[in-house]
Image (cartoon, rainbow, N blue to C red):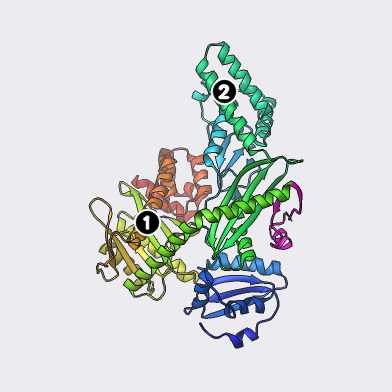
Amino acid sequence: MKDFKEKLALVPTKPGSYQMKNKDGVIIYVGKAKNLQRRLRSYFTRTVTGKTKMLVEDIDDFEYIVTDSELESLILEITLIKKYDPKYNILLRDDKSYPYIELTNDKYPTLKVVRNVKRKKNKNYLYGPYPNVSAARSTVNMINRIYPLRKCDPIKKDLCLYYHINECLGYCKKEIDPNLIEEMKKEIITFLKGDATLITKKINEEMEKASNNLNYEKALELKKMLDDINVVLNKQKIDLNNNYNFDIVNYYSDNNYLSIEIFFIRNGLLFGRHNEIINSLEDTPNEVLEYLIKFYDKSLLPHELLVPNDLDKELISNYFDIKVTTPERGKLKSLLDLCYSNAKEQMSLKEETLKKDDDERIHALEELKELLGLKELHRMESFDNSHLFGTFYVGGMVVFDDFLPNKDLYRKYKISTDVKDDLSAMKEVVYRRYFKTIMEESYKPDLIVMDGGKLQVEACKEVLNSLNLYIPIIGLVKDKNHRTSYIINENYDILNVDKDSRLFLFLTRIQDEVHRFAINYHRNIKSKGALSSMLDVIPGIGETRKKELLKTFGSLKKMKLASTEELSKIVGKDVANKLYEYLKEV
């Protein structure tokens, strides 16, 4: 560890953000502090363990930026984390966004399960989050069976099966009374807020009608539906004086691990809970805050947060612009304590497994570093592509940090329409990825893991050489049964890795994940229909342009008959020329 005594003496005692760098000048950690000097000194003047020890041993230099307030330093910290994605900042093990139930605010509303609610700019009604996606889907299916909402999106041209089984009012052909639609919406909203009185009454009426008609099978199905509603709502009910709408946050730390627990309380109901255990840097309040910022970047903020007393409520409130409190007594204090107990319980259940997994990953990283003669090995990137009968090529890149997937950095690529083979597709994706790295001076990986043998490694080397860039490469070669058989380095030598070792297993996981990611991207494109699929793989055509093309031309035949001038009115001249040439070949 370097001696920073003289440099530390010059650090001011003001608030700000600091950036730790390794010997290559790469930012490996970004933090914030009320007092920069005191915080930075703490890294080098006390005994540290675990992840903090690894960080300190990796520090070759540090920089800092002074701010006027702690809020400014927090905003700066988060901005720099997003820009540099430092390896020692929090990596969310569970990065999925939770599902919500959405009731659209259209003339003819629909009800569905949605994710990525942060991206939505409309004024639809959203309820959740639902930690259990099956529960959300079951609720939507149940409501859609009871209420004849619109089921098709977009509206079809003729009456469908849903109309004939009385689960749709026939919005495509019939004139529907707006008051009837408003009444349905109000009843559904009331139920989603936790009041099942109206919907229970409807089910009872339907059940009695089915029973009178001797349709006992349907009556039994409705009875089960009713029982499910009662069980769920009674289980979720919390005895509060008001219909509170808030999240409760608490945590427990031990042995360099931090367990964070979040309860979702909506209208007096416990919708669910979220728990995650992460490696800790022994700066617990700051880490909890950083975690919350990342978590709510993908989820809707509640109206209020309840947090323990040692978190900076004013700072959290100012950053999120919501009410943040710490209850001192009563039922809310009991709920906060229960949240803490759950965080502690989850730690006791998972800590041994996590520690074992962390030890295995670190051992495998050390083994791979030694095999490849690398001094640094943290981030690995892997590529794969997919196509349909030699057309519609797409590419995918996955990123692993210390053998853990970093899904925020996964990328999808549309590949040029003139690409007709796997190697050309691979070259294009690798070139685009690392050309962007050079132009933006962003973090490059410590290792590229190619899904393939000599030809794939050679293609990757050719692209990197053209960019005057060096990144170590390995190739994972499959046998005739498409299972990983052996591993080669950039000189095409076979590496001595036992197939039963954890290292071989971890590398195989990377290969399986990139293959899954590329295949799923292609399946998603194909599922949208033939014409939509074609437009999805053409560079320069995104969702907005695609919708305009589909709206204007409606069919492939009409689009092929269009001139470049007609196409350019929607997509611009350059993209229109590409689209015109592409349509001539399909």
Name the spot of residue 254 as percent of width and height, x first: 57, 63
Element on which disc 2 rests: helix
Q: In this view, does 484 lie to the left or right of 397?
A: left
x 35%, y 63%: residue: 449
Farthest-out residue, top: 213
Report the magenta residues as a range.
Answer: 302-330
Name the spot of residue 148 as percent of width and height, x first: 59, 26
Q: In this view, does 256 lie to the left or right of 392?
A: right
Residue 223: image tag: 2
Q: Is residue 150 visible?
A: no
Q: Quadrant of the C terminus?
A: top left
Looking at the image, is 42 positioned above or below residue 237? below
Residue 509: image tag: 1
Q: Do residues under tags 1 and 2 come within 8 Å of each other at their CB atoms?
A: no
Q: Count up the numbered dots.
A: 2
**Mark 2: amino acid:** Lys
Determine if the magenta segment contains residue 322.
yes
Name the spot of residue 358 as percent of width and height, x first: 45, 63
Nearest to viewer (mark 1 / mark 2): 2
